[in-house]
Image (cartoon, helix red, strand yellow):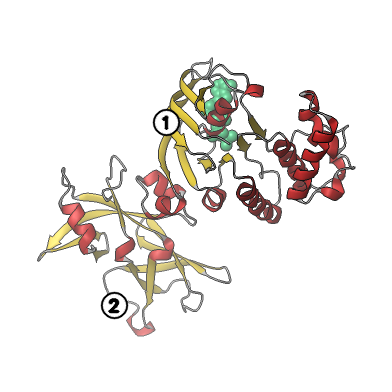
Amino acid sequence: MAGLKLKNLNKIYPNGFHAVHDMNLDIEDNEFVVFVGPSGCGKSTALRMIAGLEEISSGELYIGDRLVNDVSPKDRDIAMVFQNYALYPHMTNYENMAFGLKLRNVPKDEIDKSVKYAAEILGLENLLDRKPKELSGGQRQRIALGRAIVRDPRVFLMDEPLSNLDAKLRVQTRAEISKLHHKLKTTFVYVTHDQTEAMTMGTRIVVLRDGYVMQVDTPTNLYEHPENMFVAGFIGSPQMNFIEGELNQEEGQLFFSFKGGKVAVQEEKAAQLKSLEEPVKKVVMGTRPEHLEVDTIPSEEQETPVENKALVEVTELLGSETYLFLKIMEDQTIVARVDPSIKVSVNDHVIIKPRQDKMHFFHPETEQSLLT
Ligand code: ATP
């Protein structure tokens, strides 16, 4: 078991592409850290540098207290699980799991103990005599996890290990990996492009964009206090709504005004916005679909002009909740996630009420949050 320290880590590929920029991160022993971001953001490159599969262009990487920049992958005391399992087809699952230990000349009875221990943890006891092709995708991935466990590594590295599984199996295996982390009490670093996976598994999440770290935080903090619009939009599904507008003061009360409406800003948030070193007028307000309350308008008042009116363009019934796609301006549609009992139809008008305590404000140019 060991923590990890990434100090100003950079990766510039031989063709000159700068894939990871000055990455700084302290991972504590026994953490489950997830690297998440869209395709090409550099998450696999960062993980592969930790694994030793990719050379570090500059910066320092420590596993525990040991500087490992120039240590070969096999001597880093890590185990890596890939999305394509990488099992040997001609070997039985037992042999696949035992292979790494055999190479290290570990005595046979010790290998047997380790393989059986890993098989028990993962519920694989009955599959050890079969070959990988006789297993389902989920079972194969568990063998790959088992092969990593038998090595008793100080750090587990996983690169999109669930992406070859169907949706149901992905959810199951996700829970299994979380359980595994609790059982093994070892450091996990996990790469995914799927924010749900990141939110459900990680004790801390590193959000990456174009090779830069955008925020490192717990799932709750990322969701409640995103530091910029990228993180705000990336974490959460359906994604946060962004509405451009202005801050205006009327009789001491701060309002956020946009084309077609205005919303009072909660006192605490208003105080923060008023005390900014560089005052702003134009802002982007962010409201999550689940924090956008919707009031219906009686049919006889549908055409009456009122503030914060929106037109229902689409309704999506999902059983436990309904998504309403609401046109608020000529060119903007936002999404509200509401209780299915709400009675609205397409082309109805409704009134939108973003929850004041859940409103976010961002700088329109820097896209940084204006609140702490
Ligand atoms: P994905 O989810 O698609 O795997 P990722 O976030 O893991 O994406 P990386 O594989 O780390 O992204 O790649 C980061 C960037 O580096 C991409 O723009 C990619 O094209 C580039 N890249 C990756 N490998 C090389 C290479 N060997 N030479 C040059 N550029 C590379």
Left or right side of 290 for 48: right
Mark 1 vs mark 2, CA separation in Å:
55 Å
Closer to the camera: disc 1 or disc 2?
1
Disc 1 is placed on an element classified as strand
Please tell me which of labels 1 and 2 falls first in the chain.
1
Q: Which residue is mark 2?
A: 304
Name the kind of residue labelled 2 in the image.
Thr
Disc 2 is placed on an element classified as loop
Relative depth, front residue between 27 and 53: 27
Q: In the rendered view, would you say 237 is above or below 253?
A: above
Return the x and y of residue 128 as percentages of the image width and height. Answer: 86, 43
Name the kind of residue labelled 1 in the image.
Asn
Relative depth, front residue between 279 and 25: 25
Tell me, for residue 181, which label it has, or none. none
Report whether residue 234 is seen.
yes
Which residue is drawn at the image coordinates 66% and 41% (left, top)?
A: 161
Q: In the rendered view, would you say 185 is above or below 259?
A: above
Q: In the rendered view, would you say 96 is above or below 311?
A: above
Q: Which residue is mark 1?
A: 24
The image quarter in which residue 302 lies: bottom left
Residue at the outermost left position = 251
Which residue is drawn at the image coordinates 84% and 40% (left, top)?
A: 132
Return the x and y of residue 364 as percentages of the image width and height. Answer: 28, 45
Return the x and y of residue 162 as percentages of the image width and height. Answer: 66, 45
Find out if the beta carbon at label 2 lies less than 8 Å from the nearest ligand 1 atom: no
Image quadrant of ligand 1 equals top right
Relative depth, front residue between 258 and 355: 355
Whether tag 1 and tag 2 are in contact, CB under 8 A, the answer is: no
Report whether residue 335 is seen.
no
The image quarter in which residue 88 lies: top right
